[in-house]
Image (tube, rainbow, N blue to C red):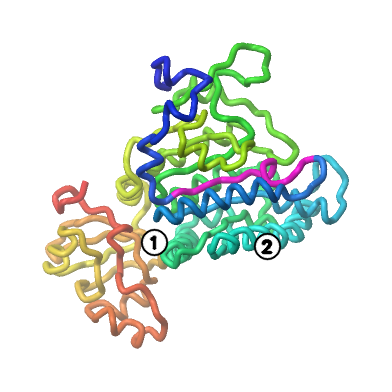
């Protein structure tokens, strides 16, 4: 259930009351979801440049503070249908895909232009929900975004609506942003919406409705509060935001629903504006390790020497040099069991190489792997962030 104190149930929270909220202050990696209705004027089909300029100014301020920002943006279909002069009302699948193909160019250019104005480099990353659910594609997307962030670029993630089908029909941008947040181990997910949070009843339903400031558990009562309402441009509604909260919290990522109608919406979040916070029960790394250890079927076994066991127990990654043998057939990104030569299971991890390639480099130095394989891969066979060790080896 949500928090029940009076201060957390009020619908009139002022910026000063929750200013400096610790979850926001502590967040270093933040994913921001931007809906079509915020970016595109519904009447004219034109990009809201003033609003986007204010958002990018907020992003620039956060970047200067050392925070890493990833944007998950809708808007391609809404912009493209205007350019193509498609009629008002629902589009069929092919029309939606055609509109996305046209609108994606305008959307990417707008982000590039406004990012450049603040000395930021925008990078477009096109994904679908499938890219965040299938392990090998998931790893490719995650590594790309991670590398962009290390390079201080601003990833702008868009659904690849020109080839996607389910996402267009059901409007899963909220869930997609949550999956991106989970994928990159984000600390906070911000859903900018046309409403400033979760209410006990739809605010326009003609009944008294109270905004919830904090939700610490998603109960059936919380789910029942979500309505189906959306606009022509924003198909999601509150139900998909609750689903997004489930995904984010399971990954140890806090989530906040805040209004995007005002300019400088991220600055407003930082000042404690009216919003609903869904607090995660644990940190992203711990949640991810639990997921690796308990929810995936291992595809093979990596047998390590005692030196590797000691290194793993002290928080190190698994290097090829510490591996004596492998069994099974697996691809990059599959789960494998890490086992000692005595037959004791040390834990599980996501392997960075397919079994055929891993077989060729085990027992070798990482610096020699590229020459052996003919391509530059990761120095680790299993990175420590992709590993869940048993309690006996020092990791819960």
User: The N terminus appears in which quarter of the rendering?
Assistant: top left
Task: Tell me the distance, in whole angstroms, between the alpha carbons under discs 2 and 1.
Answer: 36 Å
The image shows residue 174, relative to residue 353, as above or below, that is above
Q: Quadrant of residue 235?
A: top right
**Which mark, by number, is residue 334?**
1
Which sits earlier in the primary sequence, circle 2 or circle 1? 2
In the image, the segment drawn in magenta is: 30-42
Q: In the displayed structure, does residue 323 sit left or right of residue 220?
A: left
Query: Does residue 155 appear in the picture of this structure?
Result: yes
The location of residue 3, given as percent across then percent down, is: 40, 21
Q: Which residue in the protein does label 2 denote?
A: 109
Answer whether residue 39 is magenta in the image.
yes
Residue 30 x/y as whole percent: 45, 48
- Residue 297 is left or right of residue 38, and the answer is left
Q: Residues within 10 Å of mark 1 (few under 14, many from 20)?
A: many
How far across and how far down the image is residue 308, in percent? 16, 67
């Amino acid at each position: 259930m949500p928090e029940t104190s009076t201060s957390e149930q009020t619908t009139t929270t002022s910026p000063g009351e929750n200013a400096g909220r610790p979850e926001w202050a502590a967040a270093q990696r933040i994913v921001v979801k931007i809906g079509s209705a915020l970016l595109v004027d519904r009447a004219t089909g034109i990009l809201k440049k003033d609003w986007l300029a204010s958002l990018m100014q907020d992003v620039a301020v956060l970047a200067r503070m050392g925070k890493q920002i990833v944007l998950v943006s809708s808007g391609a279909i809404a912009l493209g249908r205007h350019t193509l002069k498609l009629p008002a009302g629902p589009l069929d699948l092919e029309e939606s895909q055609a509109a996305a193909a046209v609108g994606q160019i305008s959307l990417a250019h707008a982000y590039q232009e406004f990012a450049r104005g603040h000395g930021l480099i925008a990078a477009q990353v096109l994904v679908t929900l499938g890219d965040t659910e299938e392990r090998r594609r998931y790893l490719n997307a995650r590594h790309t975004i991670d590398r962009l962030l290390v390079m201080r670029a601003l990833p702008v993630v868009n659904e690849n609506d020109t080839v996607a089908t389910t996402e267009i029909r059901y409007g899963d941008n909220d869930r997609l942003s949550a999956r991106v947040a989970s994928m990159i181990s984000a600390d906070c997910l911000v859903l900018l919406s046309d409403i400033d949070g979760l209410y006990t009843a739809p605010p326009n339903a003609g009944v008294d409705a109270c905004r919830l400031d904090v939700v610490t558990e998603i109960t059936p009562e919380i789910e029942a509060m979500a309505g189906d309402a959306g606009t022509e441009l924003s198909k999601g509604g509150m139900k998909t935001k609750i689903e997004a909260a489930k995904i984010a919290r399971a990954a140890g990522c806090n989530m906040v629903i805040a209004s995007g109608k005002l300019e400088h919406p991220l600055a407003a979040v930082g000042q404690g504006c009216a919003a609903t916070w869904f607090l995660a029960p644990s940190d992203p790394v711990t949640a991810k390790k639990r997921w690796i250890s308990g929810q995936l079927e291992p595809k093979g076994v990596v047998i390590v020497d005692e030196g590797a066991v000691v290194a793993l127990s002290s928080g190190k990654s698994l290097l090829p040099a510490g591996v004596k043998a492998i069994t099974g057939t697996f691809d990059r990104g599959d789960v494998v069991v890490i086992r000692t030569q005595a037959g004791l299971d040390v834990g599980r991890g996501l392997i960075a190489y397919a079994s055929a390639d891993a077989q060729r480099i085990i027992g070798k130095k990482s610096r020699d792997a590229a020459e052996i394989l003919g391509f530059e891969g990761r120095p680790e066979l299993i990175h420590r962030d992709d590993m869940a060790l048993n309690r006996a080896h020092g990791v819960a």
